[in-house]
Image (cartoon, rainbow, N blue to C red):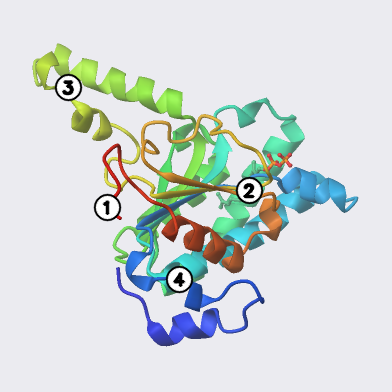
């Protein structure tokens, strides 16, 4: 994907001592970067703040990472914002998150438009509270013809639910006589996932020191490289992203074969 050299240099100009654009091979930027944004609550607690403040700070971090990915020419940035299991959190936190999602989305729409970002949702957004759902649907419509980076937000997303849904959709096609069971191969399954039109993530970043997938993109990350950092998500930013990409570029990706080196 294209990137603007001037804007790129400007965005990453004042760099910390340990990382800069010089550490990045622009010819090998991962096409799809995916973030499991974890640690908002702990970030807030560590500062004596309410969890809501952590989520607000997490949104600021996401904004920086979105712009950084656009500047670097990443094709797809996906981010795990709300899982099917997150409904089990206290109702007040669920309500706050839904409110923040709607508010952020309204606030960020001009940026997404300016940067030509197309928005997509992974997960069933039809069951979200009315206001959040309407704002998301408006955002989908407003960015549908954008040709730049795709921002895929996983909201009310769970990989097992996604796979069960794909199985259901395929079974219905078989029952209707449109598909033979023998035609159900890997690409047929991939075509029935929320990510059907997206390349698989090449780099998955998880913050806050946790080392698990938490029911996220189980099918799609088969060959992704994982980058784990102790940094809480609100402290993650463009430089954290560069460190993750530098680590990714240092990996020997074999896809089950032998090293090309
Ligand atoms: C995990 O931290 C973070 C979340 C559950 C929410 C992340 C969402 C955003 C940053 C905003 C996304 C914006 C839009 C518009 C969809 P946690 O609460 O699990 O932290 P903890 O593990 O420290 O408690």
The crowd level at tag 3 (other Cα within 10 Å; few <14, some 14-19, many 20+) is some
Ligand 1's quadrant is top right
- Viewer-closest of 256 and 200: 256
> Which circle, 1 or 3, is nearer the viewer?
1
Residue located 48% across and 61% down the image: 245
Residue located 29% across and 19% down the image: 167
Q: Which mark is residue 184?
A: 3
Report the side of 253 relative to 126 (left or right). Answer: left
Mark with earlier residue (2, 1): 2
Where's the N terminus, which quadrant? bottom left
| Distance CA(mark 1)–CA(mark 3) | 32 Å
| Distance CA(mark 3)–CA(mark 4) | 40 Å
Secondary structure beneath dot 1 equals loop
For mark 1, what is the residue?
Answer: 260
| Distance CA(mark 4)–CA(mark 1) | 20 Å
| Distance CA(mark 3)–CA(mark 2) | 36 Å
Instruction: Tally the marks.
Output: 4
CB at mark 1 closer than 8 A to ligand 1? no
> Which circle, 3 or 2, is nearer the viewer?
2
For mark 4, what is the residue?
Answer: 24
Q: In the image, residue 162 lies at what x, y percent? A: 39, 28
CB at mark 3 closer than 8 A to ligand 1? no
Mark with earlier residue (3, 4): 4
Residue located 25% across and 28% down the image: 189
For mark 2, what is the residue?
Answer: 207
Q: In the image, residue 147 lies at what x, y percent? A: 29, 65
């Amino acid at each position: 994907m294209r990137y603007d050299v001037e804007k790129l240099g400007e965005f990453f100009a004042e760099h910390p001592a340990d990382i800069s654009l010089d550490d990045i091979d622009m010819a090998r930027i991962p096409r799809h970067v995916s973030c499991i944004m974890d640690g908002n609550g702990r970030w807030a607690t560590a500062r004596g703040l309410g969890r809501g403040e952590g989520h607000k700070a997490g949104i600021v971090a996401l904004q920086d990472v979105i712009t950084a990915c656009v500047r670097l020419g990443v094709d797809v940035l996906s981010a795990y914002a709300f899982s099917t299991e997150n409904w089990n959190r206290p109702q007040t936190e669920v309500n706050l998150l839904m409110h923040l999602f709607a508010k952020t989305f309204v606030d960020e729409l001009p940026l997404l438009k300016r940067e030509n970002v197309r928005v997509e949702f992974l997960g069933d957004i039809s069951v979200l509270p009315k206001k959040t759902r309407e704002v998301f649907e408006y955002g989908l419509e407003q960015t549908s013809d954008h040709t730049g980076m795709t921002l895929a937000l996983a909201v009310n997303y769970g990989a097992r639910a996604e796979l069960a849904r794909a199985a259901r959709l395929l079974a219905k096609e078989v029952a209707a006589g449109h598909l033979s069971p023998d035609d159900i191969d890997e690409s047929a399954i991939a075509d029935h996932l929320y990510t059907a039109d997206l390349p698989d993530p090449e780099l998955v970043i998880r913050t806050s020191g946790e080392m698990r997938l938490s029911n996220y993109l189980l099918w799609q990350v088969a060959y992704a490289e994982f980058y784990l950092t102790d940094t809480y998500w609100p402290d993650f930013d463009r430089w954290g992203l560069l460190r993750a990409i530098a680590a990714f570029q240092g990996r020997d990706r074999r896809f089950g074969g032998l090293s090309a080196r």
